[in-house]
Image: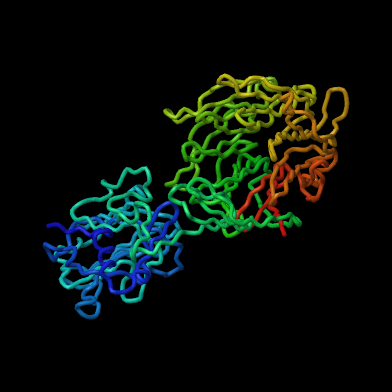
Amino acid sequence: MSCLLTLSAHVLSAHAQCSCPAHSQIQLVQSGGSRGLRVSSGLSFSAAQVFTECELFPEEFSLVATFKLQPLRQKRNEWVLSLLEGGPEGGPEGRLLLGLRVSRDQLHFLYQQQGTGRRRRVTFREVSLDDARWHTLSLAVTGHYFTLTVDCGPPLEISQSRPFPSTLTTRGAHFYVGRGAPRRGLFSGLLRQLVLLPGSDASLRLCPSSEPSVSVLSVPTALKGPVQMQGEAYPYEAEVQVTGGPTPVCTSLEQGQLWFNTALKALSLCDGNLWSPLLHSKQRLDYVENYQDLYTNSETFDVEVFTIPNEGLFLATANRDSRSGSGIYKWILGSFQKYQNISTHEARAWKHFTISAKHYLVVANSAALQPERSALYRWSPARRRFVQHQSIETHLALDWEAFHIHNHSFLVVANHRRAQDSDHNIYSVIYRWNPLTKRLEVFQKLRTVGAYDWEFFSVQQHHFLVVANTFDGRTTSVSSTIFIWSQGHFQHFQDILTQGAVDWEAFSFEGRYFLAVANSQRVSDRGPSDYSINSTVYELNPLTLTFQRFQDILTHSAVDWEFFTVGDERFLVVGNSHDGSSYSLNSVIYRWQGYEGFVPVHILPTLGCRDWEHFSTTDGSFLVYSSATSTLSKVFRLKTY
């Protein structure tokens, strides 16, 4: 018996024979790098076109579907496929013989029970298929067992008291794609693949796959190659990306798509490689407003904002208290909401990075435990959580920096001092990723002095690392060092005298390259500490190839600089943390004004400010700061005109 239903062989041919206009039935839509069909009112064809040698539905079969569906309302059901008695040629549609439908976080398979005529339903719960992402599912039916595999993940099996019927006749029946009963449960998403395979578990043919969400068993030709616009075949709709955050992917698959960035009010066109600007509304910063009070597990030393494609925007907080750990927050409906908690030990910093499209977070633990260790976490797409990947020996780690050079991935840790002897003159370590073992391995050790922060930057073909050296055991007046990549490792490039340096910020514009240092305090064994001192912006001199003092800015135990842009304007915000008597101070936003350098334009009251991060979403452009003296951090929105 040969009974094979494929979307390419039957649905498209049925569409071609339909007497109604083509555009009323099917639209070809490109979304997220893959093409699918939008079926506006459902398509139908006789079961006799499929079951040419028999009229009985197979007892054992797999149903494979690839689709993309937006989130559904509660109690909303949408049909992927149904088999109904009767149909267009044989009169009104009758009872449902078999069907597959989707509801919020659930998948339902329905069929007529043998001998009784009663409808039975098999429901797979907590299966999120309506999340605006492509998914490929394989439903295998064998006797009493119904097994669902989604995106080549772990199979879900349900056992029924009665087996699937062996005498389900398809005589006079019709298949309907994208709907169930007339005008009910129309499928609003995109269909890419629909295959009925008798006598086999199709997941064995689909998996493993490099792209499990769009695994291919039988995809119509029209959905594979370049779009053909000849004749009345398939109206083609280029998806318009509308975002306010990270730049969408632009490849040959997205060529011709438009991207509208709501935050920047800019319209761009994908040329197959880059987004080319078409229209751009130049924005200017008007004022800053308090947007969200973010309560954290404990005092927060650092925040890291990052995006995971198809998942969203996240924020990681490095929290002081080891008992409550550190938090991961997700941007949901316009604000950060708690998403995951991770065990940390007096965390001082997080760093997000990617290797081969996989996402990682590394934490700098500063607790004086034996052994002293920090941890690397990997994003698990299956669990949609970060899971520990590797433990790394560190010494009161205060910062991590990630970077790539010549197809190699590196991490460097700022080891502040050894716990056993309180020695600040120790090595900080550069690790290189081993793609075979998928582990970080020691690559190079660099002598540092109470290291607090690392910053990686590039100037044309040259690559640099600069360390913020803070304290040598006696004084904070120590040199911080710039290293240059040469002959396969980092070598000394330049020393800059700093005063308790705790942060470097590298930025460039108009062919000019800058470094801003946050000097926290002037401390020595010969007098009182001074917190109100200059922090300095340095500029690279292209003639001497050294960084030279460009501008001094009075700060109050500065702990962080953050460079950001709004339209064509450039800004620096400094985190002022302490003036010797109070932690309640004003942090300041400075705007670039050419010959004048950076001038103060906005005053932001902060409490124990420790870190600033700038980010953008469809809701606008934002700044978030962490408090090292309170469990309350804040998110500010940048209002523009």
Tell me: 230 left or right of 515.
left
Q: Which quarter of the figure has residue 24?
A: bottom left
- Locate residue 433, reporting x and y percent: 50, 29
Please tell me which residue lies in front, 484 or 397: 484
Please tell me which residue lies in front, 338 or 306: 306
The residue at the far bottom in this view is 91
Is the residue 481 above or below the residue 255 in the image?
A: above
The residue at the far front in this view is 230
Tell me: 11 left or right of 556.
left
Is the residue 519 above or below the residue 1 in the image?
A: above
Is the residue 20 above or below the residue 205 in the image?
A: below
Residue at horizontal 59 percent and vertical 52 percent from the top: 277
Residue at horizontal 21 percent and vertical 80 percent from the top: 91
- Locate residue 153, reporting x and y percent: 36, 47
Please tell me which residue lies in front, 515 or 431: 515
Tell me: 29 left or right of 275.
left
Q: Which quarter of the figure has residue 590?
A: top right
- Locate residue 608, reporting x and y percent: 76, 44
Q: Quadrant of the N terminus?
A: bottom left
- Locate residue 120, reporting x and y percent: 26, 67
Q: Quadrant of the C terminus?
A: bottom right
Residue at horizontal 36 percent and vertical 74 percent from the top: 184
